[in-house]
Image (cartoon, helix red, strand yellow):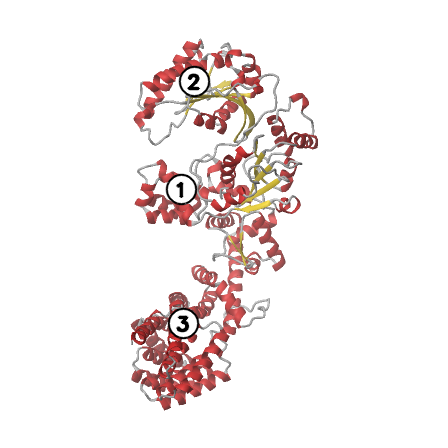
Amino acid sequence: MDIEGFGDRRRTNTHQRGVRDGLYQVVEKAFTTAGLPWADCYREDRGDAIFILAPATAPKPLFVESLPPNLITALRVHNETHPDAQRIRLRLALHAGEVYYDAHGVTSASLTLAFRLIDAAPLKAALAASPGVLAVITSNWFFDDVVRHSPGAAPATYRQVSVAEKETTTTGWITLPDHPYPPDAASSPTVPRNVPRQLPLAVRDFTGRAEHLAALDKLIPPEGEEMRAVVISAVDGCAGIGKTTLAVHWAHRVQHRFPDGTLHINLRGYGPGEPASPGEALDGFLRALDTPADKMPTGADAQAALYRSLLDGRRMLIVLDNANSAAQVRPLLPGTPGCMVLVTSRDSLTGLVVTEAAYRLNLDLLSPPEALQFVSGIIGTDRTEAEPEAVKGLIRLCAQLPLALRIAASKVAAHPQTTVAEVVAELAEEGLNALSRGSDELATVRTVFDWSYQRLPADQARPFRLLGLHPGPDLTPRSAAALTDLDLPTARNLLDDLAAANLVEPTGRGRYRLHDLLRAYAADRAHHDDSNESLMKAMETLLGWYTHMALACDQVLFPAHPRLSLRLPAPTDAAPSLDRARAFEWFESERRNLLAALHNAVNNQLHEHALHLAECTRFLGLSGSWDERLDSASLGLAVARSCGDLEAEMKFLSIRGEAFMDLRRWNKAQDDLDYALKLARTAHNRTQETGALNNLGAMYCDREQFEKALRYLQETLPLTRDNASERQEAVVEGNLSRAYSGLNRYREAIEHGERGLEFRRRSGDLTGESGALRLVAEAWQGLGNHEKAIMLCREAIILSRAVGQFQTSTAEALATLAISLYQTGEAAEAISCWREAAALFDEYGGPHRAADIRQRLREVEGG
């Protein structure tokens, strides 16, 4: 006997003690009044339940004829004399069989069946839906041998149900003695067609999935229309994503549309024990469809044929949960229209989609709003609102995976004194371990992941483990090939196979990802199953691939820039053919992966990889990501210093100084550039000395201290000529043009600007050419030749847009163009150019320039 809702939070410890005392009084009185030998019964207390073994001499009919009405009377007396929090409603399970006693207590298969019956979801649902105080379930054997032959038990008021608890799948019979089902000949020896309703209990706090529910709803024809075919929906997704929850919730919502019944089975495709065979499933379904034992065919093919015959003409909903393959499902499909089959699986069941035209519905992680609503439904609105940031942290650490969220939120709900922040701290410290405790295998994240992993063949299992080591948020077949030491076609097939098993998720454009908990699981398996040497080799290969690809793309985008000499062995495979567009696209798509790879290289002391990766993040400046550029330069500088690489140290001091300049952190910029200059002069490194001097000159131009800028730049120019670097000379000539324009010395500005433009063109520096055109335009603008300035600016804008990646260069040219347009009376076009320039600066990391331009717009539009 089990008390309904014993753990309800409204019951305090005092209430629970009162409930347990009341339970024993009620049961003892009911046994005594019914004529059952209470004193001779073996009893074990289960906290919220009593487990009772009556002696074999006790007349079995008394348990169904006399015990239930006496329990009801005693319960009503108790409930009327106690407060609401101490009222009792009971579930009672009855079975008979052999029991073995030993020093540890009692055990047997019969006892196990009784325990499964009392936990049966249909029994809980029956009592929950009843206004009475008692629900009784008997085993199939007990019903056939006792209830059916006991008129006082009213066998016609029993209803047959399917019980699927843990490893047990069986039939039970439920009655509600104080609110009985209408008499039905279904429980008599001559049984007409039954209407099975086998769905397990739906979860109380189902949240979200509105789009998926709507998609399933659309598969059912409107009221009054017949189904023209067997409708099959295959719901797939990774472990813990909520497939069963969704399927059962939706099936409960719509089963009234299927008047001939609802069949359900857990096919155990992933989980403890062996998967259910088609024969096992068909046997249960045929019994639910009232097939007498003597009419039960032998062999799965014969059973499937009878099953299809019995479904012909019926309108039924069939829920096949936790399938492992299309082959496991096919024998359970009806052969004629009228039925709908809902299948859940961690496999994508592509075979059903192809051959049976199944509708595939893939479940993803909960959206942040759905996850918030889900957690709030478990811990309560008050606690959610009291710790909003901690709740966000909990959702993030659980990767928005429903199973993980339920486990973590339930830890909070179960202990009012535990804060959300405390659970978040535990998750942050222990990760998967914090979500994988407890004896219930269905409720631990690691275990449900294990069931998917253990089905992988060996040639997929190790690569899957290695994918967990990937440092970035997503990956491609090429990066997967590098990490797993597979050729590209094999890596591509691997990712497709893992995606079919819902162990990786395709995200479009040939990219894949593992959500954070699956990544942690895969990495944990790798560290457990593979040697440290093999894992380090895999990481070096992956980081080497990223490094060489980054170097190749950097060379395409910035062909004239000086670079550190190659510190790694040349790649065995040549880099793919790249143009500017493809190089920029690769950088943008791999941006987060490259930054993660850089951090990974630093953490694993792979200095050569780290130096090159840090240098190749200059593309971040194209989108105005100055903070990320600063972080990568700081990492490069730290690595250079740790390994005593003076050339790299000078290089990254200059790069970091430039990043500080872009962030307008002038003092920090000057510190780095002054120190770079000092090291370069000490080492007699003219290239680094030239770069530091030029950057200092550019910084003073940015600060509009043009006299200081001119002194540095005039010292720089001879050095660039000595270094025979046309690109570097072009940069210095451009900065000199800026300085002279700032001093209103426009003729000199034009002279240096045009020389810089010529060098840019000779070195093929297209992006620099656009900037040089604008500098010359600014000088002509200073001389009042706005027509010349407009022509040069338009040329600069056309070139910059053709290059496509340097949006700040486009914005500067637009801002310069707007000034000359306004001066020549083209106010409308000028305002349009300023607005576009401000928007580009907002988007690409120039907020101070956007603010300057908008101030100019206010002045113009206000005037």
Front-lying residue, 324 or 194: 194
Point out the tag, 3 or 1, that comes first from the N-terminus: 1
Residue 670 occupies quadrant: bottom left
Mark 3 vs mark 2: give the one in front. Answer: 3
Give the residue type that dot 3 points to.
Glu
What's the residue at 41%, 26% (across, down)?
4
Q: Position of residue 470 (x, y in %)?
A: 50, 56
Which one is in front in this view, the residue at disc 1 or the one at disc 2?
1
Q: Pick whichever of labels 3 and 2 is earlier in the sequence.
A: 2
Label 1 packing within 10 angstroms: few (<14), some (14-19), many (20+): many
Q: Secondary structure at mark 1?
A: helix
Residue holding disc 2: 43
Disc 3 target residue: 836
Residue underneath mark 1: 408
Query: SS class of the residue under badge 3?
Result: helix
| Distance in Å between CA atoms under marks 3 and 2 | 82 Å
Q: Is 807 in front, or is 102?
A: 807
Residue 9 lies, in percent from the top left, at 34, 32
Q: In the image, is residue 73 above or below residue 425?
A: above
